[in-house]
Amino acid sequence: MILITNSTLVTRDEQNPFIRNGAVAMDGNKIVEVGDSDKLKLKYSSAEVIDAKGAVVMPAFVNMHEHIYSALARGLNVKGYSATDFLTILDGMWWTLDRNLDNEFTKYSAIQTYIECVKNGVTTIFDHHASFGEIDGSLDAIEEAAREIGVRSCLCYEISDRDGMEKSKKSVLENSRFIKKTLKNNDDFIKAMCGMHAQFTISDETFEFARSETPKEVGFHIHIAEGIEDLHDCLLKHGKRIIDRLDDFDILGPKTLLGHCIYVNDHEMDRIKASDTMIVHNPESNMGNACGCPPTMRQVEKGILTGLGTDGYTHDMIESYKVANILHKHHLCTGTAAWAEVPQMLFENNPKMANRYFDIPLGKIKEGYAADVIVTDYYPHTPMDQNNINGNILFGMNGRSVVTTIGNGKILMKDRVLTMLDEEKTLSDIAVKTKKLWDKINK
């Protein structure tokens, strides 16, 4: 049993949102009690105690759109690569990278990503993977890393025709195999979806094959209208909007996750809402790729379940919160935009979305919920209560404010030291593998 004491406790529980001198008791992978620190210390006197020393303690984060495959690209210069638009960024950088990834590189990418997730207080991710250098077994390589480091994960492989129909078929079958494996295991730590790149790299034939190979129990994880080129392609080749094309192949639904959705209109948003399909917003990536600002505030207004992701751009969900907050204020030219919507996306919607796959309740420090808890080094120097929690987080914290991360009832990091591996040795090994990958890309 683990007991966190002496905390400024942010629970996200509507009935008990904020506790001064709070404590949380965890046994196994669940929270068993939340309450006054002095009382719980007496009740659970034999527990392993983590003294928060007055700092803020809150639920760990969920990231609804990650890209593990990009982890080893930090600082990479691809020979002959010069980006001029979004498509050349994709082909010149990211598709060049994934064509050189084998399962060994994929696993090291996963280890690096999961380390940074833990160090930023993220204990659940939805990943969208691509490694056209080696497709078969690539999701198993990621699963191995997830279990070793302790980050709950929903995985998929990116289906695309861009490297030919043989690899496209293999990518469908990798999804199908892994989905069936996770459905059979049903251990509530690793789940699966059917991943798709974007409709402009997927033929009707591939859509039909993917739909036929995907069990009805799961949905699809696909990039939608990330760039204007995706919309133009769909209109010119198929004479319809992207969401209508997905609808033709029965892709929409409550288990399906649409990434980005920058160039969608009201008709499409209404169809997304009617089908109870989810959207994930990735503000930093959209800005970094100069793709545009999605109508996220409109999507939330329409009642679409909309969450927040990083697209692999970062692993810091607080950073994404900060950027989304200012992006929509700037885009809509109003200082009142995003104050309520973005924290709702991060703190409420992300756990709701994840719980469409994972059974254990996520996102609250409450009895019966997952033992996913983070301790920060943030000591409020202004009055803090349930009414200004989000303002304190927005203006006072970042991901590296997290000093201790507990995921699924296990201490993954304590006082900034990882507990499940030798970080110095692991990072050294990753650096060696990364140089090998870069040399392969630029040979």
Image: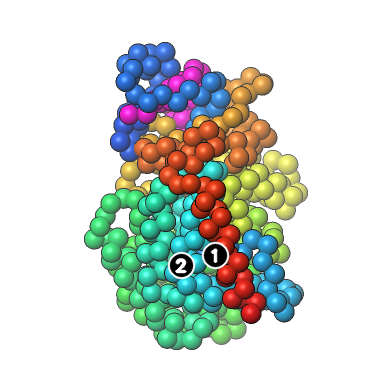
Residue displayed at 45% across by 35% down: 373
- The answer, for residue 222, to whether it is visible in the render is no
Outermost residue, left direction? Answer: 184
Q: Amino acid at mark 2?
A: Glu
Indicate the position of residue 244 as horizontal and vertical percent values: 49, 72
Indicate the position of residue 63 as horizontal and vertical percent values: 50, 50
Indicate the position of residue 415 as horizontal and vertical percent values: 53, 33
Q: What separation in Å lies between label 1 and label 2 (alpha carbons)?
A: 9 Å
Label 1: how many residues lie within 10 Å, few (<14), some (14-19) or many (20+)? some
Residue 11 among those drawn in magenta: yes
* Up/down of 399 relative to 143, above or below: above
Residue 106 among those drawn in magenta: no
Q: Is residue 387 left or right of residue 326?
A: left
Front residue of 354 and 345:
354
Residue 104, numbered label:
2
Q: Amino acid at mark 1?
A: Lys
What scheme was used to colour the molecule? rainbow
Asked if the residues shown at circle 1 and circle 2 are in contact, with their CB atoms under 8 angstroms apart, the answer is: yes
Type of secondary structure dominating the magenta stretch: strand
| Quadrant containing the N terminus in the rendered view | top left
Identify the secondary structure beneath mark 1.
helix
- The answer, for residue 156, to whether it is visible in the render is yes
Q: Is residue 7 left or right of residue 226?
A: left
Q: Which residue is mark 1?
A: 433
Boundaries of the magenta span: 1-24
